[in-house]
């Protein structure tokens, strides 16, 4: 499946409680989200598989891929479009072997050493960050700022998406740093109007 990293929504169901996860994702896609990652650190595999299937129905016909965070079993069972892994999750080689050639596979990167060690030929994209400190991920790595982002993007031959504390007002900085897109949780999940929150990223004028 082809993919567009320009506005990458990572979900947090706990933040979406008023609006609900499916409605949040639907609204966010209407507002311009181009790719969705289901991330849930608390659900069981079975719960996450059921949630992934519901999100697949929401995304059907939109062309927006569904990526699963960390859990290979969930990605396989739900027939999701891809898997995103962190440095201490399922190895990329195992993920590619299990998911097949067509799957979209991404890896989180925070340092040049991690980039140098990454099996780039088995990956479709990298997530680079956190750009800023964020309350959305416990024990996140050291923030790298826009300069750190630019240096990692410049050293990376793959499509890349920036993550960590990003808001609509940062869209131009991220583009200038050379990344293909922004990945966000709290700037869309849990916002009173997720469609408008997504649209805000799209309407930042180039400067
Ligand atoms: N990985 C690095 S930072 C982060 C993840 C999953 C959380 C991003 O959330 P937010 O709310 O967009 O800062
Ligand atoms: Mg992880």
Image (cartoon, grey):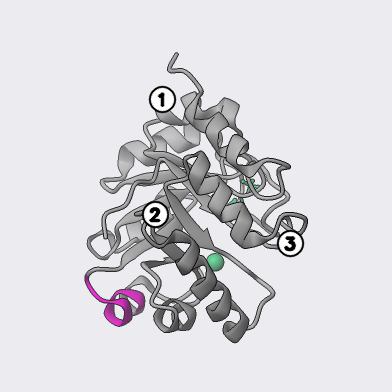
Establish if 205 lies above or below 52. above
Q: Which residue is mark 3?
A: 14
Q: Secondary structure at mark 1?
A: helix
**Residue 193 located left or right of residue 123:** right
Q: CA distance from mark 2 to mark 1?
A: 25 Å
Residue at left offset 67%, top offset 43%: 133
The secondary structure that dominates the magenta segment is helix
Q: Which residue is mark 1?
A: 176
Instruction: Confirm whether residue 87 shows in the render.
Output: no
Residue at left offset 39%, top offset 54%: 64
Depth-wise, is mark 1 or mark 3 nearer the camera? 3
Q: Which residue is mark 2?
A: 64
* Mark 2 within 8 Å of ligand 1, using the beta carbon: no
The answer to which of 18 and 4 lies nearer the viewer is: 18
Q: Earlier in the sequence, mark 2 or mark 3?
A: 3
Q: Quadrant of ligand 2?
A: bottom right
Q: Badge 2, how many Cα within 10 Å: few under 14, some, many 20+?
A: many
Depth-wise, is mark 2 or mark 1 nearer the camera? 2
Which residues make up the magenta segment?
A: 95-101
Q: Badge 1, how many Cα within 10 Å: few under 14, some, many 20+?
A: some
Residue 97: in magenta span:
yes
Q: Badge 3, how many Cα within 10 Å: few under 14, some, many 20+?
A: few
Q: Position of residue 150 (x, y in %)?
A: 42, 33
Residue farthest along the top direction in this orientation: 207
């Amino acid at each position: 499946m082809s993919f567009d990293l320009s506005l990458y929504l990572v979900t947090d169901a706990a933040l979406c409680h008023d609006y609900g996860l499916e409605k949040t994702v639907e609204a966010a896609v209407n507002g311009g989200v181009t790719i969705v990652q289901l991330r849930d650190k608390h659900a069981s595999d079975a719960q996450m598989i059921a949630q992934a299937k519901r999100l697949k129905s929401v995304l059907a016909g939109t062309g927006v891929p569904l990526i699963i965070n960390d859990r290979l079993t969930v990605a396989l069972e739900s027939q999701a479009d891809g898997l995103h892994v962190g440095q201490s999750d399922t190895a990329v080689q195992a993920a590619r072997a299990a998911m097949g050639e067509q799957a979209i596979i991404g890896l989180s990167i925070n340092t040049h050493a991690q980039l140098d060690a990454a099996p780039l030929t088995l990956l479709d994209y990298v997530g680079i960050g956190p750009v800023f400190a964020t309350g959305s991920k416990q024990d996140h790595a050291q923030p790298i700022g826009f300069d750190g982002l630019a240096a990692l993007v410049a050293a990376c031959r793959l499509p890349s998406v920036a993550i960590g504390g990003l808001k609509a007002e940062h869209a131009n900085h991220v583009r200038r740093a050379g990344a293909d897109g922004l990945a966000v949780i709290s700037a869309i999940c849990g916002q009173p109007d997720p469609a408008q929150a997504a649209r805000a990223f799209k309407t930042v004028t180039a400067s």
